[in-house]
Structures are given as structure tokens and as C-alpha cells.
Image (cartoon, grey):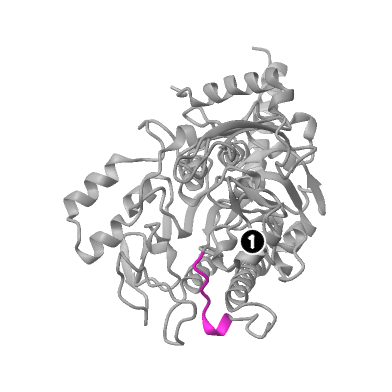
Amino acid sequence: MNPTTSIVLAALATLAACNSALAEVQKPNILLIYADDLGPGILGCYGQQAISTPNIDRLAAQGLTFTNFYGCNVCAPARASLLSGLHTGHAMEPTKGGLEASLHIGTISEDAFHEQIRAKRPVSTVDSDYLGEVAKRAGYRTAYFGKLGVGFTDTHQMMHDYGFDYFCGLLDSVICWSFYPEYYWENETKTIMPGNPKQTTRNPNLFATGKASMTYSEDVWLEKALAYLDKPRDDPFFMIYATQLPHGPVSIAPKDHTYSDRAEWSENERLYASMIHKLDTSVGALLEKLDARGIAENTLVLFTSDNGHEPSYYRSATRQEDAKFSHRTWDGHTQGEDRFRGTMGRRGTKRYNFEGGVLVPMLARWPGKIAAGQTCETRAVVYDIMPTVAELGAVKISHRVDGISFLPTLLGTPEDQREHEFIYWAGRNAFNRDAIIAGDWKLIEEKDLNKSTGKRPVYQWALYNLANDPHETENLIADNPERAATMLKLVQKAKTPLR
């Protein structure tokens, strides 16, 4: 090798090393704020007027707002999709929660608890990655705060398996229904909540408003998350803040009952609105901490929810109201009056695979990288988050996933954005039936109101064009038999195991 070639190769090696180091320095922190049962219409940036959400709206003003982002129709499958990068037909079959609550009060044995824990996992193959593992391989230190419960109950060992170095929160979906749980987990340590009542499986401590001596769980998650962010480290962080808010039953600490004076609202509406204010306050505190640490410029903040809106927590429609608002119906159930219109008028709510049950907010802020005040109509879904994190960290995922990285959309290069062949939700029961979106078309199995009688439902396939009919009111299947047949083949493809 001649001297000139050696010099050139050495220079190229030095340049590559510098570029690699630069990429490592510029790798952003990632903060995923994961709300619970939050429909997009509850937020000011999506049109809400009755409830103020200035901190969340600031994320939208400073970043990108997705108008077609999807979660799942209930909490546990959404978390399984988030952690696995798989749609609900591949990720898991949800099981009933409450195992840890039963173990805690002694109604099941330790052996029975672990036997049932082993029976279900979000990803069925042992060589599959979880989201935290992907982030760790990309050089991130990982943390998870708040609510988990992937279909039943998780354990601190499972949190380690999911790839999280640090965990603080609740591991049982039933216990997560209370904002005054008896205890929480910090890694493998069980910590008693000061002033809170004893746990039961039948009534997991549901209180509309607690006493001053009781501990509201959101306060704990926020305090711990802020403390975590306050510790300066050299390596970037990947952090999930999975708040319980605004999952019901409606509940707020007396000190945070912000909307208590709204006499024209029902008490449940006042409580729910105060929960939204509490959520917005938590988001504001997290953003302020990023600013105070001087790391906001190099932090990608994602804000989304597990599933769509659930108005039954606060709405108590009378028969007269049901009749008045019967034009908003799905599967024979009237939606009734919803003061806050969290579904933005979309059909269905939580538990249904109609748009109102699966459409969720998604906001993304990364100053200097994501253009401020932008909106996009790209159809993306919760299981896209894992491949997005992988692309940000320049690492591979060990198993095939259903998700597609939406990093090109974030960075304003839509010409590089791959699109989904389809987005799919597996039907599980009478509430949520199979549904699939391909382009602007949605095929969904829904109740045939002309043939269903009493407890004997009859289902039919329906086809909707979401571009022209986002409320899913006009079934076009009779006029589009070939398209329906093509989409039915996609449903079968979606059900085919990846391995």
C-alpha cells in the first residue's frame, strides 16, 4: 500500500469515527408520555373548548400533530403492541387482570400466581425483542413510570425482561383502576402508599375524592419521574411516563379539583375535567424539568394514549337524552350526550374498533428537528413506536414486527416514509370485532341491527371510506364487492403468524 493510500484510508477512518461520535452525541433523549383512555377531542389542540390543556397544546404548537394515529381499543393490548411492535393479532391474547391483587390479599398461592404469569407473555417467542431492550441496545438508559398490566399482571422481573433498568409504578391492571392504591413497586421493592386503604380484589379502592391524608398515585409517579430527570448522566435516556389519567372511575384529590365550581356540569363531569387538568399539569412539570436541565433541545417528546375516549366515566345520559342523540349509534348502543366530545364525533368509544375507540392523539416535539406547528395525515399506529426508536438508535430489531418507523414523517421527509399495507386489530369479543384499514378504506365486522335479537347478535362485514366518512356512517360494501374481497384477504394475511 502506497503512502498516499494509507493517508487517505486513515483520514476516512478518522472521519468515520468522528461522524459516529457526532451521531452518538446528537442521539436524542426520548420521553414517551402515555395517557390512559384519552380521546384526541379532549385536548385543546384537537378542538376541545370546555377544558383547558395549555401544556399539552404547547407540545402541538412546538411540534407535529398527527390526525390519524391509532392505539388499540382497550389498555392491555395497546401496551402489548407498544412493547412488542406487533399488532393485536400477533402480540398477545389479553387475560383478566387481578392476579397480583389476589396474591397480595392471599386468595391465590405464590405457585398459582407464577403459573398463571408464565401462561401469557406479550411476545410468544423467547428470541423476540421488547421496546426497552431495543432502546438499551441503542445506548439508552431506560425507565418506566406509572401504569402497566399487559393483559393481566406483570412483575419486576418481567419489567427487566422488557428492557427497563428502572421501574416505578403499578403492575396489575385491576390495581391500576384506583388512584389510591395501597402500595406501588419501585423495581423489586413494594412501598406502602401513606394513608391509603387496604387493597381488595372486589373493590380496588375507588374513591371520587380522597382525604387530605391519602396519597394520589399520579403525585408519586410525577415526583419520581422528575427526580429521575434531575440526575445528570452522560448517556441519553429512554423514558415512558405511563400515567393512569384519565382512566375511570373519575377520581381526583381534593387539592386538584380544579373544576369544582362549574355548577352547570354534573359532579362526574367536574371530576373528569379536573383529571384532565391534572394530566396537563404533569405534562407541564415534565417539560419544565427538561427546560431547567437544558436538555429540551435534544429530547424527542412523544405524547399519545393507549386507546380512544371513554365517556361513560362521567356521562349519565337519561333515556330522553339517548333518544335525542340517537343519531350517534354503534352496534345498537346510543352514545348519548357527551359534553366534552372526546371522540370528535367519531363512531364508538373505548372497547370498540370503530374510530372513536382506536383513534388517539399523537404529538411529537424535537426542537430544531421537527418543524413547529405542523400537522400530518399519515396513518400511523402504536406498534410503529418500536421501529421508530430502533431507527433513531440505528439498531436492528431481532424479530419481524408489524410496525413501520415514522421517523421520516417526524423529520419532514415524507417522500422517505413507508406506508402500511394495512393496520389491523384482532376481534376479541362482542365489543371489538376484526377491523382493518388499507389506505382510506376500513373493513370492520359489526352487528347487523336488522337480524340481531336480544342476546343473539348477528354480525356482518361493513366497508367505510374514512376520507369521505370518518364517522363510519355509510356502509359501502354493496357497491364495492371487489375491494371488500381484497380486504378480507388482508384480514387473513394479518392473522398469519409472523414466524
Taking the spot 42% from the left edge, 62% from the top edge, the residue there is: 176
- Residue 372: x and y in percent read 81, 53
Q: Main secondary structure of the magenta part?
A: loop
Can residue 31 be found in the magenta stretch?
A: no
Residue sitting farthest toward the top: 1
* Image-quadrant location for residue 115: top left
The residue depicted at 79 percent of the width and 36 percent of the height is 413
Locate residue 270: give its quadrant: bottom right
Image quadrant where residue 184 sits? bottom left
Instruction: Give the residue pinned by disc 1.
Output: 322
Say above or below: 138 vs 51. above
Q: Is residue 236 visible?
A: no
Q: State which region is magenta.
A: 248-256
Q: Position of residue 348 (x, y in %)?
A: 62, 49
Q: In this orientation, does residue 66 appear?
A: yes
Residue drawn at 40 percent across, 39 percent down:
93
